[in-house]
Image: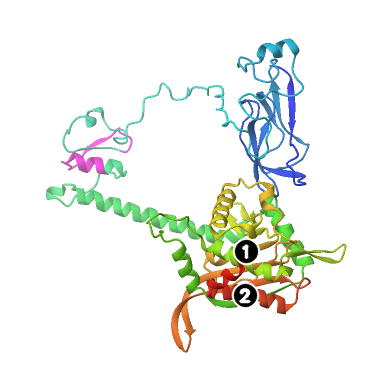
Amino acid sequence: MGEVREFALPDLGEGLTEATIVRWLVAVGDTVRVDEPVVEVETAKALVEVPCPYAGVVTSHAAEEGAEVAVGAPLVTVAVSPGGGAPAGRDTGSGERAAETGPSPEPEHVGGSGNVLVGYGTAQPPGRRPRAALRPPGAGAGEEPRSGVGRGAPAHEAGRDTGPVAEGANGSSRTPVPVISPLVRRLAREHGIELRGMTGSGPDGLVLRADVERAVHAAQQDAARQDAAQQNAAQQDAPRQGPRRERRIPLRGMRGTAAERLARSRAEIPDASCWVDADATELLAARKEMNAPSAHGEPTAPVSLLALLGRVCTAALARFPELNSTVDTEEREIVVLPEVHLGFAAQTDRGLVVPVVRDAHTLSAEQLTAELARLTEAARAGTLTPAELTGGTFTLNNYGVFGVDGSTPIINHPEAAMLGVGRIARKPWVVGDELAVRSVVQLSLTFDHRVCDGGTAGGFLRHIADCVEHPARLLRTL
């Protein structure tokens, strides 16, 4: 075995200083290749697979799963083969040159694109070399398997019916029992019913199948009563055993970052909320018309409802740019931003994340639909890059997917506003002077009161509601 090298957690960008180890992709003793991912870590932005620049045998892990590791701290140690990059016995295509010149300062990248933290190279991850074979099981190798026929059953029971004979509990006593059917004896053996001493309901006390089934049912009832008694005793003893242990969930990774950002938002931003109900019937009809096949029968690219709401937001922000801004507390200035980078809340197994659609104001409904779908899939897979999780200027939160009507969400710091969309439900609605059943949605706006007053926020939300109720008004801004 060659030189042992230590691989430290590299700089993952975006000012990140630490990461949490989620899962080791290699175990101690595994053989790794150059640029093979060795560990999956969770940063404040996303899940990242970290590739190792050395080839060889993993000799140790520097931390356990769930531990936090600082940038520059050791991750793994690898016993590098004398060849300078690949483990001994593996042909890398440059072994002769490595033997002549010695180990190079930087490892060679064979069949890949090198150390890439986002994307992880252009080659597929190589197959894992199998570890040493496990010790063959020796215990019980020469033992004969136990028979499922019964407890101490004589050998002749396995082959044929020998008449009304039943076994004792230990197989030593054999007392005649009025049993004719071998099926009855097998049923008794399978359920542990002792036939000796049993008086059957058949002629001359013959034990029938119904007798055994009743005995089985009675035994099951006895077992159920014993279990209930034990559970009651355990419940009565529970107070004496002390309180149940609390469960602690570490605020790390994305969950920890979200907690810090939400707490900072509440501490720094004087937020206020307003809301309005809107008739979304025409918006749903417009979406249905957009997704219908063309006049020639050709399918069209689908447009999602979230994308339409995103287009409504960008149109409203063009009219009320104060809500697409941030507050510079050091300079005591409101910074109105020229581009709309639209964030949207996405719930994943690892918690709430807010992917960002860059330059959303320049995208059509079809383009916005495609980008929202791509980012949502990446969020669920945990493959969002730090750049796709930062830089938002306005957030759209569709909490209606959880079946709720309204909410007062916390602003995504350092943004100035967030639009919330509840579920679309069929409700009675006044149309003209008549009552009708319409598709109604509640819209809520939470905004930073430093950047605008209630008049601006109300005008923004009213414009959103008008576009939802009359989608044709969007044509004025396109």
Q: Give the residue at x 36% y 28%.
A: 145
Residue lying farthest to the left in this orientation: 203
Where is residue 94 shown, x and y percent of the image? 66, 15
Q: Amino acid at mark 2?
A: His
Does the rendering let one see residue 461?
A: yes
Front in this rendered view, residue 295 or 181: 295
Residue ID for mark 2? 463
Position of 314 with respect to 139 (left or right) is right
Q: Please tell me whether mark 2 or mark 1 is closer to you in this view.
A: 2
For the N terminus, the image quarter is: top right
- For the record, the magenta segment spans 169-187
Position of 407 with respect to 179 (left or right) is right
Q: Amino acid at mark 1?
A: Leu
Where is residue 436 shown, x and y percent of the image? 44, 82
Front in this rendered view, residue 349 or 156: 349
Where is residue 371 shown, x and y percent of the image? 58, 53
Residue 202 position (above or below residue 471): above
Q: Secondary structure at mark 1?
A: strand
- Between the residue at mark 2 and the residue at mark 1, the CA separation in whole angstroms equals 15 Å
Front in this rendered view, residue 44 or 443: 443
For the C terminus, the image quarter is: bottom right
Find out whether residue 170 is within the magenta segment: yes
Q: Secondary structure at mark 2?
A: helix
